[in-house]
Amino acid sequence: MSKSVSLKELLHDNTAAAAPELVVAGENGVLRCLACGHKCNIPAGRAGVCRVRFNRDGELRVPTGYVAGLQIDPIEKKPFNHAFPAREALSFGMLGCDFHCSYCQNWVTSQALRDDKAVSFPSFCTPKELAALAVENRAPVVVSTYNEPLITAEWAVEVFKVAKEHGLTCGFISNGNATPWVLEYLRPFVDLYKVDLKGFDDRNYRRLGGVLSNVLETIGNLKKLDFWVEIVTLVIPGFNDGNDELKQIADFIAHVDVDIPWHITAFHPDYKMTDPPRTPIDTLIRAFDLGKAAGLRYVYPGNVPGGFGDRENTYCPHCNELLIRRHGFRVMDNRMNGDSCPACDAVIPGVWEDSAPKRTEGPGIPRALSH
């Protein structure tokens, strides 16, 4: 029996019923799943595009009770630059994805049911154990990440309910291929939402397994529902690094809200996309300039610590005071006065602490956990 078959059987034995808000019964036992933008119609005995949500005898079954990745990350790695600077996040993930990006940096978890080379097995746990780990490690944020959290939304909500009881803030690190129904379901429990906006070319999006319009609609809906949103574009040479496409992304984000932080990060060859070179620093500086020209107040180049001069920092858009000085995932100096600029008292959009650390403590690198 192959690894993928045995893993499939293991996951099918560790499931729960889908949230009623995320499933619609159709004719002939077909169930429509509303957890992601594919909105799969799933006959009995079959699974959706994600391969982890499946129809068992007329009931939609979904993953529960395990993690396939668990570690403490600097929150800047997620990346969030306007939420809990210099703090850490308990990061957990499951298995599976509704996309199949050829350059996925988390492919060992996201592609575990599609690719026999993706070796990542579940470790069974409870929401209480995960929340306790966050508290023990003084991490004020818990995030669902590594695979696509939309397709495992019910488990994330189970974890977040307990996390909220401990006063923790919760977040999704997502491709943004959501539906209005799943965002409404998540809103009481999810505060922070990072979206990967992978480009502005629908043909390329379809090559990755998605539809551009779904992601754009999600970003608009996230703002309407008052999630804190930050957007990341991995800039890949020859794929999405043209001036026109980067300008379209910047213009779209600015149209939604000029205060949404846009992270433009450097690609490195990974998984099945090994031909393009690493993204040149000059390309990200060009994207930075396009973002600023579009009116975005917060644009952050990343993945090359110290390579962008002062562009990794946060400045007050009203008086240009330096607010947060960064080097990669490390905060070197946090001068914020709670949620405000210390020079002009302007409120800076984000999710801030009243008494935040002034700098990253310790090495500021991810560290794996076991429960």
Image (cartoon, rainbow, N blue to C red):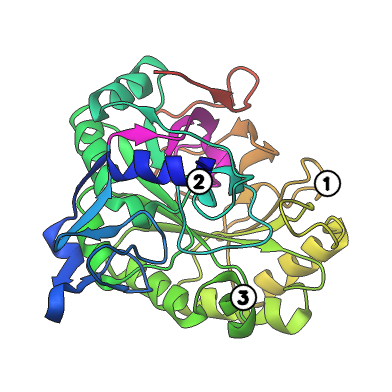
Q: Label 3, secondary structure: give it.
A: helix
Please name whichever residue, 282 or 196, is drawn nearer the observer in this view of the structure. Answer: 196
Percent across and percent down for residue 281 are: 85, 56
- Examine the rendering and report whether any part of residue 341 can be seen: no
Type of the residue with mark 3:
Arg
The numbered mark at residue 307 is 1
Residue 4's mark? 2
For the residue marked with disc 2, what is the amino acid? Ser
Above or below — where is 300 with respect to 137?
Answer: below
**Please, what is the three-letter code of the amino acid marked with disc 1?**
Gly
Which region shows up in magenta? 65-94
Q: Is residue 186 left or right of residue 308?
A: left
- Is residue 38 covered in magenta? no
Q: Is residue 132 visible?
A: yes
**Label 2, label 3: how many angstroms apart (C-alpha)?**
23 Å
- Neighbourhood count class around disc 2 (C-alpha, 10 Å): few under 14, some 14–19, many 20 upward: some
Looking at the picture, tell me which residue is in the foreground, 242 or 273: 273
